[in-house]
Image (cartoon, coloured by chain):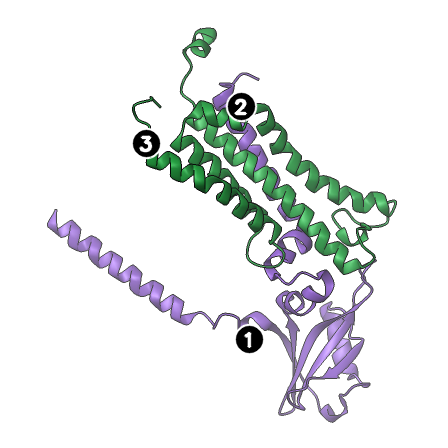
Chain colours: A purple, B green
Amino acid sequence: MIETRWFNLIIIGLLCGLFIYVAEDIPPFGDPEAPTIKYVELFQLELTDIEGIGENSIPSRLIQKLKERGFPPITRIETTSRTQNEWNAFISKEEPYYPKEEKYYFLRKEGNLLKVYRYAFVVRWIEKGLKETAVPNMVTYGLADYRGYDTLGETTVIFTAGVSVILLLRRKGRL
Amino acid sequence: MNEKERDVIVETVSRVMIPFIQLYALYVIIHGSGGPGGGFQGGVVFASSFILYVIAFNLAGGRKRFPESANTLFSSLGLYIYGGIGLLAILFTRGMAQYLNYGFIPFTSHFEENRALGMDFVEMGIGITVMAIIASIFFDLAQREEPVGEKEEK
């Protein structure tokens, strides 16, 4: 009996250590520049005339590579305000009632390599949400507007659970 | 619950607390778009006031305050509000906009304000349904077995 107790204590201690390690390993909450939530690397290109990239000129090899990978084409490139070696690339979406361009790619120059990243959906969620819905709470416009179908389904699940309990307990299985 | 088991302190405190709990639940539902809160949380807080009433007083009194017919009505009313708001977007644009696209419902003249107001109504619908369903489940679980009903089954 005593051995079991010590064994349980050791297991609990190990679990606590694991949780503390995991909690320490999480990227800082709310950090907008944390790479794991911001963008994913797609591929990298070796460009010789990398200086030609700018506001109006998009390298033809980049367009070709995006086309053969099946990614949407770039319509506009903009320099980010932080450094000279990073660009934001926009695409024009084909949503019928939102004919707006969206920030989609992130380009960075390292030596003579051009690394191409794709922004996560979270970036659009954070940057455009207040402008599009006039609601300051990020969770609410996600729950009720962007994922409205999902919430309708969740409410239906709750309704179905209540009706099942009524059927089983109040009416005792009689239909 | 018998008459002997009644407690004056518990009854008085809950009689004072229940209106404030319900007011707080309405606050949480209405302020879902501005601060923390929303339909699910507010609905559960509202239902907890019924649970407190039943614990402090008795089940029959709780059923009298929130009758079975109203309970069934409210549990489907919230879903009807949600689905109806979604359908209004289709009706007002004659099939142009998608289902649940609140921006096209002409509450105001601004697209973004329409979306915010549509979200508020949807949260109210969620709150009503969650409140009624949680209360319904609680009342069904708290009910004692009625001997009359068992005789009917045999």
Chain under disc 1: A
Give the residue number, with chain letter if any, for mark 1: A35
Considering only order in the chain, which callout, 2 or 1, is on the residue closer to the N terminus? 1
Give the residue number, with chain letter if any, for mark 2: A167
Tell whether label 3 touches label 2 (CB within 8 Å).
no
- Measuring from the top left, give residue B151's x and y in whole percent: 43, 7
**Along the viewing direction, whichever of A55 and B4 lies nearer the viewer:** B4
Q: Are marks 2 and 3 on the same chain?
A: no
C-alpha distance separating marks 1 and 2: 50 Å
Vertical placement of B70 versus A38: above or below? above
> Which amino acid, by three-letter code, is at mark 1?
Pro
> Which amino acid, by three-letter code, is at mark 3?
Asp
- Measuring from the top left, give residue A3's x and y in whole percent: 13, 52
Mark 1, other Cα within 10 Å: few <14 / some 14–19 / many ≥20: few
The C terminus of chain B is located in which quarter?
top left
Count the marks: how many? Answer: 3
Give the residue number, with chain letter if any, for mark 3: B7
Chain under disc 2: A
Residue name at image x 62 percent, y 56 percent: A140
